[in-house]
Image (cartoon, helix red, strand yellow):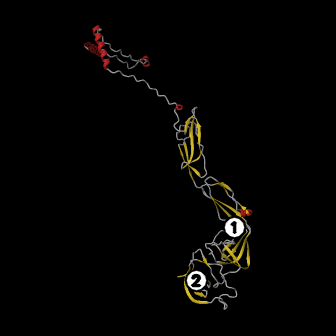
């Protein structure tokens, strides 16, 4: 240790001597006009030579002491570990096993992507498609359409091939298609049948055709007889020139009895029904017949634009009215069969106590001729006279002179 201190003292002494010598040396004068050689040459200063103090060589005993001190310091100070550089190697995609069957890498480095087609409830609409391509190569999704469905959502959309564990999912939602309405009219624009409403799934096909009973008289058809259902309704029309209806007058009186409730039509071959019904059991006089050569049907005119089709299931034809007295005993004449047991003059309002859709029979006289038109329910009338016959039937005469059965009226 004394030897080391002596070396440090000698080094400081020699350093101070050199500093004093440098300070006493005069500084060179720099010319304000450097020579050509000076301006063209760049002088690089030399590195300073480190100072080495001159000390006497240590003796063998001193050298041994120095070596022992150095060895002791090395034992005390910990060794510094040398950090080896780390090289990060990229993962080999081929060596990594696939995590999901929706995307796989083939042995030649290509990528597989699965595309599924499902509805909103997860039901498959088509088999899953598998696409194969190189990494980052363009990917074209095979879009598909399904009748009654529209594409609502695309999950995991991608335009190039790259690993996609979940695959591409196309979700479709159901959509209701608008109907196609078909009209069948004659040359005057009258409907020959109720409008047809054709329905189907969106984007599915439809086809229309004329009515069978009128196809031989078709004069115009729609521009397109087939197409696909869409979101907007379509209206198509067929125009016919059917054979004319033949009208015939009756040579003899004819009556019909209603067996089932009927809604009369406004005219023969018309689907427009009147807002009324003919009560079951009521008897009606027939004024004329109409023959439809197109359908081979016979229509009966009950008066007042009330037409019914001749159908044995709904009406019964009769030559006489069972409710009418024989001709030799009309009511009101001296030879009347029934006598009046009570007669009261009135001026009393009343209402027809029936459903507005129903009608009651109007008579010219009690048990006389039935008038063509009935009296709708809820109609307000004025009663001028009430009669009671010996058979205990009750009749009311209205202000217009016609008669109705009193049981159908409600006085107010």
Q: For residue 41, which quarter of the picture?
A: top left
Say above or below: 358 vs 56.
below
**Image quarter for residue 79?**
top left
* Residue 147, x across and y down, in percent: 61, 51
Nearer the observer, 411 or 10: 411
Specify which label sits upstream in the sequence, 2 or 1. Answer: 1
Classify mark 1: helix, strand or loop.
Answer: loop
Can the viewer see residue 396 in this picture?
Answer: no
Above or below residue 278? Residue 29 is above
Q: Is residue 85 left or right of residue 117?
A: left
**Mark-to-mark CA distance, 2 and 1:** 45 Å
Residue 182 in percent (x, y) is at: 66, 61
Q: Which residue is mark 1?
A: 188
Question: Residue 66: which disc?
Answer: none
Residue 406: mark in rendering: 2
Q: Residue at x 48, y 28 (%)?
A: 89
């Amino acid at each position: 240790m004394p030897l080391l201190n002596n070396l440090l003292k000698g080094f400081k002494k020699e350093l101070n001597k050199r500093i004093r010598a440098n300070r006493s040396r005069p500084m060179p004068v720099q010319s304000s006009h450097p020579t050509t050689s000076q301006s063209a040459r760049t002088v690089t200063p030399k590195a300073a030579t480190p100072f080495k103090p001159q000390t006497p060589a240590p003796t063998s005993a001193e050298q041994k002491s120095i070596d022992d001190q150095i060895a002791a310091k090395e034992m005390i100070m910990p060794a510094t570990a040398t950090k080896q550089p780390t090289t990060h190697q990229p993962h080999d995609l081929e060596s990594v096993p696939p995590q999901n069957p929706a995307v796989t890498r083939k042995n030649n480095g290509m990528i597989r992507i699965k595309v599924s087609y499902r509805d909103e409830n997860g039901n498959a609409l088509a088999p899953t498609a598998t696409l194969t391509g190189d990494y980052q190569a363009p990917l074209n999704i095979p879009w598909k359409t399904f009748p009654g469905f529209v594409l609502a959502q695309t999950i995991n959309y991608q335009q190039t091939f790259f690993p996609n564990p979940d695959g591409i999912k196309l979700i479709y939602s159901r959509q209701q298609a608008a109907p196609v309405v078909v009209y069948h009219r004659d040359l005057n624009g009258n409907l020959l049948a109720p409008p047809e409403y054709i329905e189907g799934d969106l984007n599915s096909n439809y086809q229309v055709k004329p009515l069978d009973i009128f196809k031989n008289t078709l004069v115009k058809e729609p521009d397109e007889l087939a197409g696909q259902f869409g979101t907007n309704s379509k209206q198509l029309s067929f125009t016919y020139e059917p054979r004319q209806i033949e009208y015939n007058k009756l040579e003899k009186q004819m009556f019909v009895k209603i067996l089932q409730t009927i809604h009369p039509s406004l005219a023969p071959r018309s689907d427009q029904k009147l807002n009324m019904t003919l009560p079951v059991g009521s008897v009606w006089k027939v004024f004329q017949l109409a023959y439809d050569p197109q359908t081979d049907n016979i229509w009966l005119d009950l008066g007042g634009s009330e037409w019914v089709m001749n159908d044995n299931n709904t009406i019964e034809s009769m030559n006489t009215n069972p409710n009418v007295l024989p001709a030799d005993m009309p009511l009101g004449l001296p030879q009347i069969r029934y006598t009046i047991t009570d007669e009261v003059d009135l001026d009393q309002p009343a209402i027809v106590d029936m459903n507005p859709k129903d009608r009651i029979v109007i008579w010219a006289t009690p048990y006389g001729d039935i008038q063509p038109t009935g009296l709708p329910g809820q109609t307000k009338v004025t009663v001028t006279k009430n009669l009671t016959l010996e058979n205990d039937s009750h009749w009311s005469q209205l202000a217009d002179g016609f008669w109705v059965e009193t049981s159908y009226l409600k006085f107010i």
